[in-house]
Amino acid sequence: MIAYLIRRLTVSVLILLGVSFITFFLLYALPADPVRQIAGRSATAQTVENIRQQLGLDQPLLVQYWRYLTGLVQGDMGRSYLQRTDVGTLIAARLPASLLLMAGAIGCELVLGLTMGVIAALRRGTATDQALMITSFVGVSAPQFVVGLLLLYVFAVQLGWFPIGGYGTWAHLVLPSVTLGIMGSGWYSRMMRSSMVDVLRADYIRTARAKGLARHRVILRHALPNAILPVIAMIGIDIGIFMGGIVVVESVFGWPGIGQLAWQAIQRVDIPIIMGVTLVSACAIVIGNLLADLVTPLIDPRIKLR
Amino acid sequence: MNAAVTKLSGAEKAPETAPPVLSVEGLEISVRTGEGPRVLVRDLSFDLARGETLAIAGESGSGKSLTSLAIMGLLPPPAVHVSGGTIRLGKTDLLGLPERWMRGLRGARIAMIFQEPMTSLNPVLTIGRQLIEAIEAHEDLSRRDARDRAVEALRAVRMSQPEARLKQYPHELSGGMRQRVMIAMAIALRPDVLIADEPTTALDVTVQREVLELLRDLQRDLGTAVILITHDMGVVAEMADRVVVMQSGRMVEQGPVREIFAAPREPYTRALLAAVPRMGRGEGAAASGIAETVARVEELRVRFDIRGGLLNRPTHAVHAVAGVSFEIRAGETFSLVGESGCGKSTIAKALTGLVPFEGLLEVAGRRLESGQRPDTAFRRGVQMIFQDPMASLDPRMRVGDLVAEPLVIHDIGTPSERRAQAEALFERVGLERDQLDRYPHEFSGGQRQRICIARALALRPRLIIADESVSALDVSVQARVLDLLKALKTEFGIAYLFISHDMAVVENVSDRVAVMRLGQIVEMGTRAQLFGDPRHPYTRQLIAAVPVPDPTRVPPPFTRPQGDVPSPVKRRGMEPRIEALTDVGEGHMVAGSG
Amino acid sequence: QDYTPDPDAQQGGAITITYKDDVATLDPAIGYDWQNWSMIKSIFDGLMDYVPGTTELRPGLAESYEISEDGLTYTFKLRDGVTFHNGRAMTAEDVKYSLDRVTAPETQSPGAGFFGAIEGYDAAASGEAEELSGVKVIDDRTVEITLTRPDATFLHVMALNFASVVPQEAVEAAGGDFGKEPVGTGAFKLGEWTIGQRLVFEKFEDHWREGVPYLDQITFEVGQEPIVALLRLQNGEVDVPGDGIPPAKFVEVMNDPAQAERVVEGGQLHTGYITLNTQIPPFDDVKVRQAVNMAINKDRIIQIINGRAVPANQPLPPTMPGYTEGPDGYAYDIEAARALLAEAGHEDGFETELYVMNTDPNPRIAQAIQQDLSQIGIDASIQSLAQANVIAAGGEADQAPMIWSGGMAWIADFPDPSNFYGPILGCAGAVPGGWNWSWYCNEELDAMAAEADAMADPAQAEARLGKWSDVYMKVMEDAPWVPVFNEQRYTMKSERMGGDDALYVDPVSIPVNYDYVYVTEQ
Amino acid sequence: MSDTTGTLPPGAPPPVARRAPRGALARLMRRKLALFGLVLILLTVAGALLAPWLTPYDSNDQMFDGLTITGAPLPPNAEFWLGTDLLGRDLLTRILYGARTSLIIGVVANGIALVIGTVIGVSAGYFRGVFGAVLMRFTDLMMAFPALLLAICLAAIFQPSLWIVAMVIAIVNWVQTARVLYTETTSLAEREFIAAEKTLGAGHARILLRHILPHLVPTIIVWGTLGISTTVLLEATLSFLGIGVQPPTPSWGNIIFENQTYFQAAPWLVFFPGAAILILALSFNLLGDALRDVLDPTQRGRD
Ligand SMILES: Nc1ncnc2c1ncn2[C@@H]1O[C@H](COP(=O)(O)OP(=O)(O)OP(=O)(O)O)[C@@H](O)[C@H]1O
Ligand SMILES: Nc1ncnc2c1ncn2[C@@H]1O[C@H](COP(=O)(O)OP(=O)(O)OP(=O)(O)O)[C@@H](O)[C@H]1O
Ligand SMILES: [Mg+2]
Ligand SMILES: [Mg+2]
């Protein structure tokens, strides 16, 4: 177990290195000069050169990358070009909100997606199945901005059940999580349905029924844990997909996460922030995958970590 | 509810007058297909008396499993369903019962043990959970009492350390243990009727023996009525009071076991009994020593690494095959017997290039040395029939295509020739031409194995490896297949490497036999030498475990050797000790002192 | 000429204002964004200031100032009793420190260039000198600033955020994070700042201007989608949506009398224009540029943005001093445009590219322009890019033939006609990385502009504006731009907000002059 | 899980000699839903190709009468069946022309992603060893990238054009498919029938194509059809960032994105293109589901 963890972490670090390397070079290949933005409209060529030197942007890329890495090892993610603040601080201030939102979304995906998938599998081929299939496609196809505003309008403005955006209490978390989770729950329900259909055909389900177990017990205790395994592996992947969605969801709900930070940084080519956000989300993805892998043996004792 | 039932303890036979506990009348089971309904079982009637053991025997695909599922109300929905007749448990009509009521009866008054102990237990729940929930589903007991009942049930099936077992998962148990858990689960609530569908087919001879003894003891103690489904007439003879013989969805004969064995009325029953392999009836001399050698195995070793540690390096190794040598000559059937896990299949895999090996292999003049992979020509020379027919057929292909596939791979013939060949092969293995366009899941287990055999025959190889290939077949088909194999052997000079745990079959088909244990051969010789004069204690034990298809015979008491089974797993670098074989006369080789 | 306080104004109360984008920094030397511009104005003060809601200069931290005969020396007399938020009294040293700081290269201030006229600027900006030699502390209350050339805009420069006075010890204590822990002399001080969520400004009790501010507290909630901000405003949770009325809601709001009543409209020092790159053929031909000017249907474009602008015919917006009344510029006339194009040898039109920033409504405007151009045979493909990429493309001589300025458009830093010339139309901006995206360089006009700016004597103000007017008219003859419209600002306030409407569309303290607004009920 | 005790319908045709039609296509055609899906897809393709003949307007016509005086778009009416957009263009026309872009993105780009994902996932799962490990680490690396960011960088570096965008989307979207198929392939490769094929001498190509791939079809179909909506919307996100298909070229995604803030004032601008995406995705799903059942013999007798 320990050996496994160490091995996995080593691989993760290598992956993160790869991510940082590729991102770094991609970002500096972008056709936008950060120094111009810093210097402003009234700057002279001399000022621009000065700033370029101060930021070390006149050095060869590899040198810059090496500097970035050495900084990173010491916990320094650099300073934002435009906000003139430590990137680490900026991200640290916003990360918890994003993680909370992702956790909420995963919860929503699991609850909605699994329920829909299980019901569809049990009612296979019926109108319910078809309706759920359409619902899941609506979930996947609906633009998140519109879903978010719609939810906000109905449940916060009209019904007043939830606050109109913001951050702080559990009530604030519900609508953003649902908005972010709706797409994933569409995916999950489809996956859950197909894996559930397979599991329902298994011999041990027949055994469970032969024991005279109640229907819900057969489904919840025997079928569900077996069927959920492929879905769990998805959760890790999900975090990467969320990164696109949180930008929209966070802005609709005024959620103070890294999505908004990233969006602004991308618009203005604030490279240190983009780097930082990329690395942090890569970390989240890697950790998410690791967690998913660590959880599976808890559900399926046959799986050994190797 | 069970407590109210008076148990007839120790009764070998139920009184004729007592009302039947289960009665099936005019049962008809159909399947809906794209082309309309098809009847699978028709007009089946039988009664089951309290405390009685009724065996349902018959060829594969005759509808035995469907019947038992129908009684349980567990026919696979929605295609397969009961289309006529009645099933009564006591006075209740099971077919008319709503699912909710039926659920109350399942497990409590009728319980079932399935054929596949490996897949019939939920892999993600502990044994304890699965046992306890079965009890809790029917009786209002505290968790603690339910647990005690579970332990008691495990003890009843003679599991060692029952308390500790509760915490284990199915994959941590051997096949025999799993089957015992299944039985424990079935008897925990003392059901009136216990249906056992091929409870021992998947098990070793020695384990089979144990399980059978167990069932008999339990039945004697609890007075449960048992429906035992099997195609092994030896098992029928040892276990049953009465027999129902089925053939292609119909009952052909029914009667007390002694009568049926002594004087079968119907020709099918007679044929069935005639086909039963019996020990000591093997015939034919060993192929003479001058025949050419078709296959040679020299100092074969196969190791599977077990990885671990920080760098995931191999730390241990399973010495699945540890220095095995033998030769197979043209027209000879060479058998490997031995308990599960002794390395039989691994030898077969090495010969077919599925695992890397050390040593030397030679088939039809083509040599293969350590580390080499077989080429196409080598592969044409040796074909294999696998243990599990369902698993070894691609479920998404039509069986006709599957049988013709080797021809396609080796680029033989035109499509129509291949089709013709497939049809011919199909008939040869006892299937019909018009089944060529079906899919594997539409066949019974036995039928599927015939498909596998047909596929293996397609290339007319010099050596066919039959790994437990007839274990799943009913006796009559088994006999036909064995006859077929025999015919092919003489026709084309094909040799067989026959792998089985069924000593009776081995005794019937083999020219020479090798007994394996822990990856090594402990005894090897001609059939006569081995069965007539077994020298190694292990060989003797195997022979003693075989059920004898003679209901008049009282089986000798069976004792399983105690103590730890030595393990083929060794630390990396450690080699297993290889016991040299000594010739005790005329090529009869025995390990150690004998 | 000073401001008369609102007689109805009430003291106290707290309001909530929302913004979409996070506040990057509150460091006056750095902050140059839509949302932090007015916040910095409330936290800091400069020597000069504007009369609230107008473009008129008035003294700020300086009590009075004197300009020497030759217009090269400014002597500022500082006010007494001004204290920083940290309690220390402000002195002339602070003024000097602040100007040295904003021009020092380490500060990387985007506004450093504004101080180019101060003596010693070049040495300081290149890092050769530690300080600006032109800024001298005469005594605690007096600062003397020497210029290298007369500069009529210098007082405006001293009213810029970049010229705000900051306390050295607080800057040093913050160690690079002054932008997150600002200390100034302004009417409000920073209370709490939760990154990504909210900033709370609290009334600075010891503010030197008596009775200001009115409010006790302002909460800025950031990261709020404008549409949602409006919903919250309608729900009574927000007092002013900092980003104004979102276009998607504009018609709805204006059609509802109850809401329309609370809408505030005002002019802006803004011009939306298309740059035509004079270095890239065929835009190197003035006829082509003029033809393009004639081809744009400005009314249609204004209709597309729901009439929230007025058509423009010259670079300066109408509210800017120096605006030339009268001429209609190039009238919308497709026939004439075609004819001109044919004259230039492009009767079959040509293909080109139109760069635009990718936030609504700019891509839409670009599409309208595209359609107009297609009427005269010009096939312009649109490059809708992130702001940074458009700016980068504009800064290359051969990259962007046409750029629609929206979203990055010129909103004046200070209300003076010169502000629309230098970097965006003058030769100085026509360099790689510069902001003169037309790459238009007319030495003659540059000379005229320099002359105009040298007319620092207040007596010459009229003449100076006339000169500027001529400059812009001459620019229009060369047509490096297509001025399209001057945007009107529309914003909303909650019912309880009081104060002159002009404070909500303040031309300088964009978007709201926080110091002077108040609430009528609490 | 219901118990079937029903009897056969009277007058059911007698069992005939069963040699089912071998063509999967023929069987597919017998399914109404599949046919319905196919018809919808064909209609979409036809709409995209025949757009110039189907509508009297051009997709870029900013019509004078397409906006109200205050510049608001028109709701659906007799002249503009689906209403007009914010520039006074006919929405129906734009959706028809937009189908061209969206089909390329949702079908071609998504298809390419699916193919890359399948090839990488399946080969990594089947071949194991160093080759498989390298492929999987590469997949992990790609997976660790926030997809949107990668897309933004790639698209910004190359000049935006439809095909570049399609390529970028393909590059970004194959990862999940690869990951999922990898897992499935590893367990499939362990199955005995694959061993059986090997002993018959079947080559890797044959095993992969004839025996492994067919078993992955259900998963591929689920991911492929769900991917349609996701990729169409991703294209829109990229357009929105200025690195997608450039205006005024319509795509369903960018119609939604351009107008999403107006969804209360002009819901038709979001609803119709959204419905178009949904219908396309659903049609493929109907077709795919049927295809899956047709290809899975154990599911026969269920239609
Ligand atoms: N789901 C099904 N659909 C169609 N036909 C089926 C199905 N299940 C079983 N059959 C057919 O029903 C017949 C009886 O099958 P059943 O499994 O009862 O045989 P069996 O007697 O148990 O054989 P075996 O000894 O091989 O287990 C066989 O011909 C089989 O092909
Ligand atoms: N791929 C593998 N990796 C590790 N160990 C293996 C592998 N395959 C087989 N073994 C081990 O090798 C030993 C021999 O297995 P093999 O399958 O040859 O037994 P067998 O005699 O055929 O048994 P059975 O009668 O159950 O088929 C067993 O201990 C088994 O656990
Ligand atoms: Mg059976
Ligand atoms: Mg074996």
Image (tube, rainbow, N blue to C red):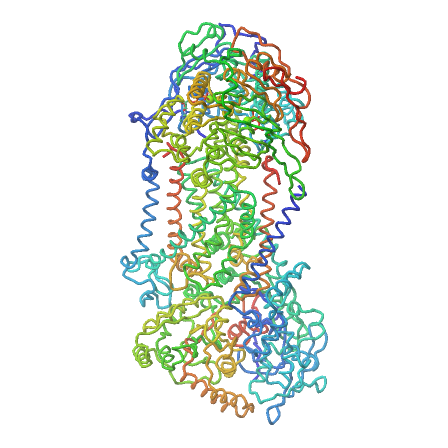
Q: Position of residue A159 (x, y in %)?
A: 49, 52
Q: Quadrant of residue B341?
A: top right
- Residue at the extreme front: B290
Q: Position of residue D237 (x, y in %)?
A: 46, 58
Q: Position of residue B309 (x, y in %)?
A: 67, 41
Q: Position of residue D25 (x, y in %)?
A: 33, 40
Q: Is residue C184 above or below residue B204?
A: below
Position of B85 with respect to A183 (left or right) is: left
Q: Quadrant of the C terminus of chain D?
A: top left
Q: Residue at x 49, y 48 (%)?
A: A182
Q: Nearer the viewer, residue C343 or B309?
A: B309
Q: Is residue C135 above or below residue D5?
A: below
Q: Is residue B52 visible?
A: no
Q: Quadrant of the N terminus of chain D?
A: top left
Q: Quadrant of residue C91?
A: bottom right
Q: Residue at x 54, y 78 (%)?
A: C413
Q: Is residue C116 visible?
A: yes
